[in-house]
Amino acid sequence: MSGAPAVRRPYYRRMGRWWQRDPFFRRYMWREATALAVLAYALVLTLGIVCLALGEAAWQVWLAALRSPASLALHAALLAAMVLHTKTWFEIMPKTMPMIFVGERRLAATTITRCGWAAAAIATLALLALAAGWRP
Amino acid sequence: MPEPARAAARSITLEVLRYRPEIEAAPVWQSYVVPFSEDLSVLQALQHVKDELDGSLSFRWSCRMAICGSCGMMIDGRPRLACQTFLRELLPGPVRLEALAHWPIQRDLVIDASGFIAGLERIKPYLIPRQPRPLAAGEYRQSPHELELFEPYSACINCLLCYAACPQFGLDPGFTGPGLLALLHRYNADSRDGGRAQRMAAVNAEHGVWSCTAVGYCSEVCPKAVDPAHAVNQNKVNSAIDYLRHLLAPRGAPP
Amino acid sequence: MSSGTSPPARSHAPIFWLLFGAGGMLSALFGPALVFITGIAAPLGIVIPHDLLSYPRVLALSQHWAGKSLLFVIVALFAWHAAHRLLHSLHDLGLRIGPATRLLCYGSASLLTLVSAAGLLALGF
Ligand code: SF4
Ligand code: FES
């Protein structure tokens, strides 16, 4: 060996805006941001419950607020975020569940995701039907 | 890449993040132009640089066939094995090469993986028999189903690509991380093993599975389809069960 | 990767993770429809009957034990799901998770849980 003696001085890189590094990370951050919508909707419902408990006049105020353009725009955004939440929740679900076997064969990740999406579609239709006045 | 352009590529530029602690305070980019051919891997391009252009460039390699796990690096921003990535996938270049993300850079493309080596000891990555078993008892027998429960996780080559894909490890180097947790699960999920109780403390810790937010990129970049994200997240279920059991039977009742 | 000889302390994350998971599942299944019904269809008077959110109907729903529990479970689990995910998001954005960030996230969820529970109990049976 020749030359200068080896220097060990490990260099630590910063994380900075790490989510901009890779499109995968950007999608992850959008997925996590859907929690803001879930929280906002929980808040909307809590306010509704409080208004309901305060009596009919307060309830009408809550309903009027829901009819405002600002609220409609907010709920359109919340709906988009909720749909993204549904999509991504079932996309990651195969990773969060133990291996499932049907007979000898292991259930494929895509099958689990599709079952989740199907369940969400059925739940959505059922809820809409119930709200529209249909009774089983 | 359209065919004519590919045929026309006679050379390709590598941009390498260099760090020589005795020369630079912080890493700097350096370009090398290497001859292009269809069957050249990134590792071979680096070897060309070292042999013909600049002998001071440092990088790790051994097997050249995606099995030793030593040539992992960031290739155009994504953690990949240099021996398994071909220049033809990266046309027209320049190809940006950087040491694996989230690890301290020792020199050039070489990382300091001593934290991983220390972690290996903690997770007891070996079969711990339920009870002593004499050789005369013969081999263990496993059904195909029992094999399937751990086989994917036994394919890990310790390449650390998954760590470079894990922002939680980047944000908090104390996190045990995908590779080690997958290896831990490989033994916990093995029907011959009885060491699960000894490994649960490492799983249950904040720096065990609970730093994971299921980003899932680790499983995308793994060159051996180990699916570390699945291993980690299955162990959230196991850890939650362990937690509730501990809550109900705090006096260390047998599991 | 921390080293040391004594085993690392057990995390209490399982409690919050179980709530996160339950709320995540509930909102993934019913969230879009709920937001659409209460936030878009009812105010615009489309798809669903006009009196769906009328005072007497919603009052009746919230005074029935089943309706009451349903509303409570939805609000509380949505809140705890969001709180846990947002806590990790703060960490993702580079903040250190400590008592302050925990209080902010889990505190908000506790607040929504308590207020909705109080409101629903005040509505009587
Ligand atoms: S789990 Fe995959 S990516 Fe991670 S160290 Fe093992 S082989 Fe490499
Ligand atoms: S040189 Fe062995 S994995 Fe690439």
Image (cartoon, helix red, strand yellow):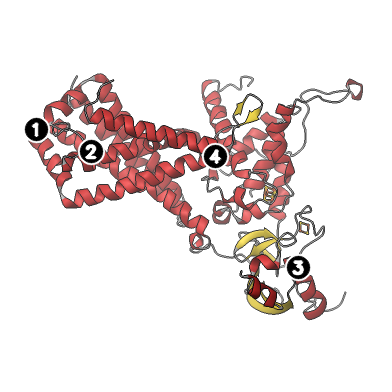
- Nearest to N terminus: mark 1 or mark 4: 1
Give amino acid for label 2. Thr
Give amino acid for label 4. Thr
From the viewer's perspective, is residue B228 above or below residue B17?
above
**Number of numbered discs visible in the structure rendering:** 4
From the viewer's perspective, is residue B203 above or below residue B114?
above
Q: CA distance from mark 3 to mark 1?
A: 76 Å
Q: CA distance from mark 2 to mark 1?
A: 17 Å
Give amino acid for label 1. Glu
User: Which quadrant is home to the C terminus of chain C?
Assistant: top left
> Can residue C96 be seen here?
no
Is C37 displayed left or right of C101 in the figure? left
Quarter of the image where ligand 2 sits = bottom right
Evaluate whether label 3 is on the same chain as label 1: no
Mark 3 surroundings within 10 Å by alpha-carbon count, few (fewer than 14), some (14 through 19), many (20 or more): some
Q: CA distance from mark 3 to mark 4?
A: 35 Å
In the picture, residue A2 is in which quadrant? bottom right
Q: CA distance from mark 3 to mark 2?
A: 60 Å
Residue topped by disc 4: A110
Residue topped by disc 2: C38
Q: Secondary structure at mark 3?
A: loop
Q: Residue at x 32, y 43 (%)?
A: A39
Query: Measured from the top left, where is residue A89 in percent x and y?
Result: 45, 41
Q: Residue at x 30, y 50 (%)?
A: A77
Evaluate whether label 1 is on the same chain as label 4: yes
Q: Secondary structure at mark 2?
A: helix
Mark 4 surroundings within 10 Å by alpha-carbon count, few (fewer than 14), some (14 through 19), many (20 or more): few
Q: Secondary structure at mark 4?
A: helix
User: Do the residues bearing badges 3 and 1 touch, measured as CB atoms within 8 Å?
Assistant: no
Query: Which of the chains bears the disc numbered 2?
Result: C
State whether label 2 is within 8 Å of ligand 1. Answer: no
